[in-house]
Each structure stands twice: as C-alpha cells, then as structure tokens.
Amino acid sequence: MGNKISVSATRDITNLNSRTFEERMQELGAIEEKTRESLKREKQSAFSRWTQYNLDHTQKIMWLQLKHPKAAAILSFLVDQMDEYNAVMCSYKLLEEVLDVGHATIARNIKVLKDNGYIAILKSGTSNVYAINDTVYWKSWGNNRRYSKFPANVILTLSEQEENYRKKLEMTKHKEIELKT
C-alpha cells in the first residue's frame, strides 16, 4: 500500500506519495506526452512498414504461388493492407481494379485462400471482412496507399458468420452491444 498516491487540494508533507491536484495533473500530462512521443517514434521507425512472416509456412506459400498465382496476389494485397488486428475490409470491385482481373477470378481465388486457411471471411451485411491467418503473417502498423484505408469500427453479428468461425468469435474478447427491444 506504500505505493499508492494520495491526491488532495493540499500536499501532506509527511507522506512522500502525497500530491496536490495540480501536481498530479502535471505528472499525468508528462506521462501522456512521453507515451505520445514513444508512439510517434514507433510509427516513424524503419520497421513500421514490415510484416512478420512465419517461416513454418514457406512450403504452403510456395504451393500457393505456383498453383494459384492470382490467389497469392490477392493474399499479398490483403496482407499489405491489413491493420494491426490482421483484418481488412474491401470490396470485390476494389480487388478487381487493383489486380486487373474479373469478378469470377476474384471469387474463385478468394475461395482458394479461405479453403486453405490463409484467410477467414467474416460478414458484415453484404460486406466481407478478411481476417488474415496470424500464424502466417502479422503486422503492427498500417500504411497509406493509393486506395483509401481508414480506421473504422466494424460491427459484426454472430448470426451472419459461418458456424466454424462463430465458435472462435464467441471465445474471443470483444465488445458486445445490447439490443433494445
């Protein structure tokens, strides 16, 4: 209990952990500034554009590149665009434009990625949220690209998800919204 800080209008000179409201506000401001500077340095780091890759999956990635090069290109795009939660939400139309291929090609190759465990597809209405397998790839910072990418809260409903992924989501820590009826 000796590490607790006591904050009041006046300082108790017999207690080394006593602070005035003003002193505590200054301390908290200094901590916040240090945190902000640290995050700024991290984002400006030469490593902020790196994606980590698990070498245990090299054979599987090589198979994908040789047998399904369009699927490998889609995966590369999704990995490049994924956020620190290994997820990205984009339309088939965007993928068609980026890769200069048709809708059927995108659909066929997204299925290859899903069936082989590279991605999971979560539904948000008619939109797809692609969750990249974090045992293969991981990234901690996003980037800016020609196609708009912006942070957003994506709200999903379990009822729209496939059964096998529904169980994983139920065990994951998440925010729940209470529906008023």
Image: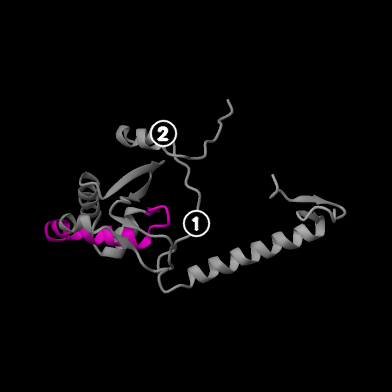
**Residue 141 horizontal side relative to residue 72, left or right:** right
User: Residue 149, position in %: x, y?
Assistant: 44, 61
Q: Is residue 71 visible?
A: no
**Mark 1 packing: few (<14 Cα in 10 Å), some, or many (20+)?**
few
Q: In this picture, is 41 found above or below 105?
A: below
| Image mark for residue 171 | none
Residue 63 colored magenta? yes
Question: In the drawing, does residue 22 fall left or right of residue 3?
Answer: right
**Picture colour scheme:** one colour
Q: Relative to 16, is 118 on the left or the right?
A: left
What amino acid type should be assigned to the residue bearing mark 2? Glu
- Write the start and end of the magenta stretch as one range: 62-90
Q: Residue at x 40, y 65 (%)?
A: 147
Q: CA distance from mark 1 to mark 2?
A: 23 Å
- Which residue is found at the position 79% from the left and 60% from the top? 23
Give the residue at mark 2: 170
Which element is circle 2 on? helix
Q: Quadrant of the N terminus?
A: top right
Q: Residue at x 87, y 52 (%)?
A: 9
